[in-house]
Amino acid sequence: MKIKYLVIHCTATPEGRKVTKQDIERWHLKERGWSRVGYSDLIHLDGTIENLIPYNDDDVVDPWEISNGASGYNSISRHIVYVGGTEKNDINKAKDTRTTAQKQSLAEIVQYFVCQYPNIKVIGHNEISMKSCPSYDVKRWLLSLGISTKNVGV
């Protein structure tokens, strides 16, 4: 199916805590029993982007490219996650914990997807689920980057 959405997530982990690809694989595959991890790419605290599920640059989400990021959206989306999203001492309290490097990398990946797929909609996970993830106002942030309103929101 054609890519329609770029969904932004957070790992819902305490501010400053490192998360690895292996952590995500353990959480999703072993602990939740999913067949695939929930994200295409992981943005580490230092801004490094790590691919979790390989994909090509065409406008189709092939079966081997699907990640389990949001029910009902997986076959039409790419899912990007940044490490963090909760208070350091209270993982039940959402907080925008993006580092400067993460914000830069996230901006670059969003701009890439918008250029590559001019009709894509960039959304926060919380716009399609009853979650606080990614712990910040994605629409406001996208507009501050100069992303066109046609690419913002569901």
Image: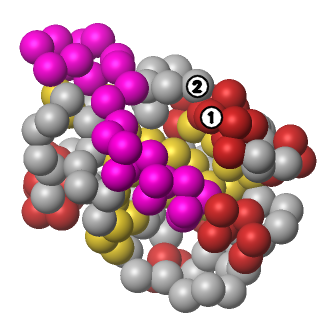
The magenta segment: 86-110
Total of numbered circles in the picture? 2
Which residue is label 1 attached to? Answer: 141
Q: Secondary structure at mark 2?
A: loop
Q: Is residue 2 above or below residue 114?
A: below
Q: Which mark is residue 39?
A: none
Residue at the image position 61 percent from the left and 58 percent from the top: 110
Residue 51: which quarter of the image?
bottom left
Q: Is residue 128 magenta?
A: no
Mark 2–mark 1 contact, CB under 8 Å?
A: yes
Question: Real-space Cα distance between discs 2 and 1?
Answer: 6 Å
Question: Could you tell me which residue is drawn at 26 percent across and 36 percent down?
Answer: 84
Regarding residue 4, the answer to whether it shows in the image is no
Label 1 is placed on what type of residue? Trp
* Quadrant of the rendering where the N terminus is positioned: bottom right
Alpha-carbon neighbours of circle 1 within 10 Å: few (<14), some, or many (≥20)? some
Tell which residue pokes out farthest to the right in this image: 150
- Foreground: 146 or 27? 146
Q: Nearer the viewer, mark 2 or mark 1?
A: 1
Locate residue 23: give its quadrant: bottom left
User: Would you name the residue on which mark 2 appears?
Assistant: 137
Q: Say left or right for 136 vs 46.
A: right
Indicate yes or no whether the magenta region holds residue 91.
yes
Identity of the residue drawn at 40% across and 82% down: 54
Q: Which amino acid type is shown beneath numbered disc 2?
A: Asp
Mark 1: secondary structure: helix
How many residues crowd mark 2 within 10 Å: few (<14), some (14–19), many (20+)? some
Residue 105 position within the rendered picture, expressed as x and y whole percent measured from the top left: 44, 59
The answer to which quarter of the image holds residue 133 is top left
